[in-house]
Image (cartoon, coloured by chain):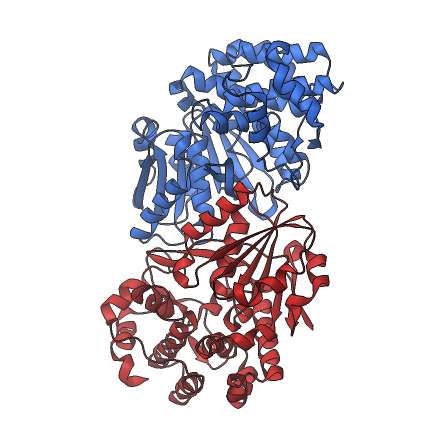
Chain colours: A blue, B red
Amino acid sequence: MKTLNVSLGQRSYPLYIGAGLIGDTGLFDRHIHSTQVMLVSNETVAPLYLDRVLANLGGRQVATVILPDGESYKSMASAMQIFDALLSQKFSRNATLIALGGGVIGDLAGFAAACYQRGVPFMQIPTTLLAQVDSSVGGKTAVNHLLGKNMIGAFYQPQCVLADTSVLSTLPDRELSAGLAEVIKYGLIRDPDFFIWLEENIEALLRRDPETLTFAIERSCANKAEVVAADERETGERATLNLGHTFGHAIEAGLGYGAWLHGEAIAVGMCQAADLSRRLGWLNEADVSRIVSILQRSHLPVTPPAELNAGRFLELMAVDKKNVDGNLRLILLEGIGRATLPVSVDVGVLMATLEEYGRNC
Amino acid sequence: MKTLNVSLGQRSYPLYIGAGLIGDTGLFDRHIHSTQVMLVSNETVAPLYLDRVLANLGGRQVATVILPDGESYKSMASAMQIFDALLSQKFSRNATLIALGGGVIGDLAGFAAACYQRGVPFMQIPTTLLAQVDSSVGGKTAVNHLLGKNMIGAFYQPQCVLADTSVLSTLPDRELSAGLAEVIKYGLIRDPDFFIWLEENIEALLRRDPETLTFAIERSCANKAEVVAADERETGERATLNLGHTFGHAIEAGLGYGAWLHGEAIAVGMCQAADLSRRLGWLNEADVSRIVSILQRSHLPVTPPAELNAGRFLELMAVDKKNVDGNLRLILLEGIGRATLPVSVDVGVLMATLEEYGRNC
């Protein structure tokens, strides 16, 4: 088991990475200091892993909320369902919430924990590669709104995160690839050596070679932890973690949440960001090709869905948290391993990427 | 104009107290750094003061959400209405939210500001005495749930608070009295000299004598600011601000939010807390009488509504944020000006207060 400390002063917490952690009762006892525990999961994950987690919670008052699977359940309605369950069972503000699932469950349960009685302890057990390398570090919690993804949320840190690599054995291939999109992102924005390592090891990751996977998760989380420790509330460098996300969120919102996986949308978004960076003269053709190539080798899409034309894309991108006073701002690349802070982009150049992207990428 | 600094490190903010502040454009310019402003108010306050506030916001993109008046609108549905308005008008995370109204509007708009895009700047203009002396200091924001008051919320500090004493001229007598309940509370929990001053000046306050009112607001806010500065997230002394609130919340929930004003319910709750303290031998009969007397002189109720029997009261009190792992915990008095931290109370003694309260008080 590897332990990574996410350094956030009083809100610091450990991230444990390793095989079989969801059966390690000692970790649960160390981080749960209440007799009341609410476990939130979904109908895909619960049948596989719920019992193994519950086995660690003997002697406590345990309740569960099991939601249907899917991004469309990352909603205020689902959060209300959790509040209803907590209140009807008289859970106090010392109760611990556990999220067992992917990013949807983690973000949703984290938001519920942040708001219930103005904040209760929260433990995260991410069960997808994406959630292990992304939402497990940084304390961003949220639900979606019909008019935009993650528009209602809170910064809220967990007590600890258990990233159990053995649960990835049941992850569908498509979700594994989606997780790799975020792994590749860390290489792109700030870790060129990791990007090269990924170019050499992407097939081993797709084969789910345990050691290769463990290294990739650890390196990804270490990168994210460094960024978040330096900028918890996203006033600076943290925004670089959103490479490809403004484009990607537009795809997710435009198709309806859940049609594409988050990582798939972000893969295309990173291609679009790379293309735009090239148009601005910041990135050379060869690097754009390396980016597109590694994403393709990861079995990820690299062109946007045909049904979203450039005008609609632009409209959807206008509702993004990085925008300031109505100006569209994007994270771009100045090289592989070097992201920009949010920059205002000339709409003409952006439209060129949006319109011609299909044949340039 | 008096300025009180609420000291919370990076989250410190000024509280301005004085007549005519809602017409002071300089204060708005000093604290609003965005071109987008969303003003939240209600149908009672907006016709009286909205235009005077809007007159300070020239040149900005201004939107308003005007809700019906009343505690029942302090709901997640109202928060969603604010999110809908913000998103449909493409408000960015630099937008400023202004709350113009009483505690309901302040708590609701504050919660919306805390959650919108994980937090946007927020300015508070409390228009009731209760809101000026209570919710304007401390950053507690929340909405109610059918199963409990303030159960969904966040700790979130405003950029500044404008407590304009001149707007109190239009406040109904009943609401003025309700505000005095919280003013009296500060004397009871930590400021015995202020309690004596209140005993001498309560009639002047009811006459709305401007100088007397200004002093009472300032002294109340200074007391609250000291408590909050020492204990922002309510791990210690801050809980004493809840004197009478566990009882009071039970009344509000039991009758349906809005039937009684918050301050009215808290007035009864403080009588009940005083009675329980007396039964435990911590408070003498004479002090209980002084407490009941000043509340009566403030035209506040001092006995609970007949429709809530002791059993129902206890049930409603079981859902309280101060409870730990199912144990009921209350703030009590060890003297006038001396509150306890939350203490577990023997249910038998509590039932004695709940059952016999009517004839003892």
**Residue B230 occupies quadrant:** bottom right
Quick check: B232 left or right of B356? right
How far from the left and from the top, in percent, is residue B340?
45, 72
How far from the left and from the top, in percent, is residue B253?
33, 63
Q: Quadrant of the N terminus of chain B?
A: bottom right
**Residue A230 occupies quadrant:** top right
How far from the left and from the top, in percent, is residue A31?
44, 43
Q: Quadrant of the C terminus of chain B?
A: bottom left
The residue furthest right is A281
Residue A108 vertical position relative to residue B270 in the rendered view, above or below? above
Residue A9 vertical position relative to residue A272 in the rendered view, above or below? below
Q: Nearest the camera: A122 or B160?
A: B160
Total marks in image: 0
How far from the left and from the top, in percent, is residue B277?
38, 78
| Residue pictured at 52% horizontal, 79% vertical | B187
Question: Do we see residue B163 in this rendering?
Answer: yes
Residue B200 vertical position relative to residue B172 in the rendered view, above or below? below
Q: Nearest the camera: B130 or B238?
A: B130
Quick check: B355 left or right of B91? left
Q: Nearest the camera: B155 or B172?
A: B172
Residue A270 vertical position relative to residue B210 in the rendered view, above or below? above
Question: Do we see residue A89 in this rendering?
Answer: no
| Residue pictured at 48% horizontal, 42% vertical | A159
Q: Nearest the camera: A46 or B175?
A: B175
